[in-house]
Amino acid sequence: MELNQLKLLFNEFGENVRFEYDLKKKNWCNIGGKSKIFYKSNNLNELVIFLKKLNNKEKVFILGAGSNTLISDNIFNGVVIKLGKNFNNISLLGEDIIIAGSAVLDKSLSEFAMSNSLSGFEFLSCIPGTIGGGIRMNAGCFGNEFRDILLSIQAIDKVGNVKTILSKDIKFEYRNNNLPDDLIFLSASFKGTKGNLIQINDEISRLKIEKEKNQPTKIKTSGSTFKNPTSQTKKKVWELIKESIPLDTNFGDAYISDKHCNFFVNKGNATFEDMIKLINFVSENVFKKTGIRLEKEIKILE
């Protein structure tokens, strides 16, 4: 649809809908151009109306915390949706079930579980990003994944139909699941195990120390670049990268992290093209050296 048509169509949403919106500051890597439309939805009713008006006539990308996302420097010819304050609530149901909005940060869910003496959520303290993004990729670390604690999700499709899906009906895989790409996650229910608050806190502290030792933090990165190729080798992806390329390789300001070579870093003003060149260089050389084809873990918006 033409931009002028879209401005008329979404006039009622006021400041919640922006046009030709800069995305560079909306992702951890600090790279990216603009989106034709950027919509911040503050509640479900608004989101339903917006999607019904859009009527699946534009590409849609859901942006969470931007922690595992690489955005093109070109304009995204579609709609970027970010879920706002009413998707950021957490509540306790009974003694061991937590309901969390999809915009809730993973670490916030971990902290809420600890405050209610619920274990099983400790690993989330080390995962950047939101609940929605975590479900989408079945995020995990230290041997735990979202599927281990998930009971159900509430979601909406791109024409405004809301549905509930039980975890047992979802086929989870390593960093993946079989949920349709057109689903927008609204909230989820999780089940924990009653535990000891001090022991839970100690476990969170232990995991954070382990992460700090092995992964870069407080820098411009999109997190783990490639998935571990579990179906092809027992080796971790960082081992394959280390075996295959010089770790001081860079393209412009796109570098490989000194701390973990599956993390690629924007050390200044790296462009999307710089980062893609580095990703492709690593992938191609790992394949030449090992015969293993790497699959990207980061989400790319272009």
Image (cartoon, grey):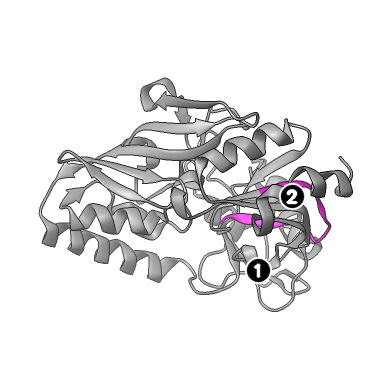
In what element is the residue under mark 1? helix
**Residue at the image point whose x is 45% and y is 48% from the top:** 87
**Marker disc for residue 11:** 2
Residue placed at 50% from the left, 32% from the top?
155
- Left or right, 16 with respect to 137, comes to right
Residue 161 seen in render: yes
Q: As shown in the figure, which amino acid type bears the numbered disc 1?
A: Lys
| Residue appearing at x 70%, y 45% in the figure | 287
Type of the residue with mark 2: Asn
| Residue linked to disc 1 | 25
Above or below, 202 against 102 in this view is below
Residues 82 and 7: in front is 7
Query: Where in the figure is residue 111, as x and y percent of width and height?
Result: 28, 59
Q: Measure how far apart labels 2 and 1 are at the Cα level.
A: 25 Å
Q: Main secondary structure of the magenta part?
A: strand
Which of the image's four quarters has the N terminus?
top right
Q: Is residue 64 above or below residue 145?
A: below
Tell me which label, 2 or 1, sits earlier in the chain: 2
What stretch of residues is rendered in magenta? 68-80
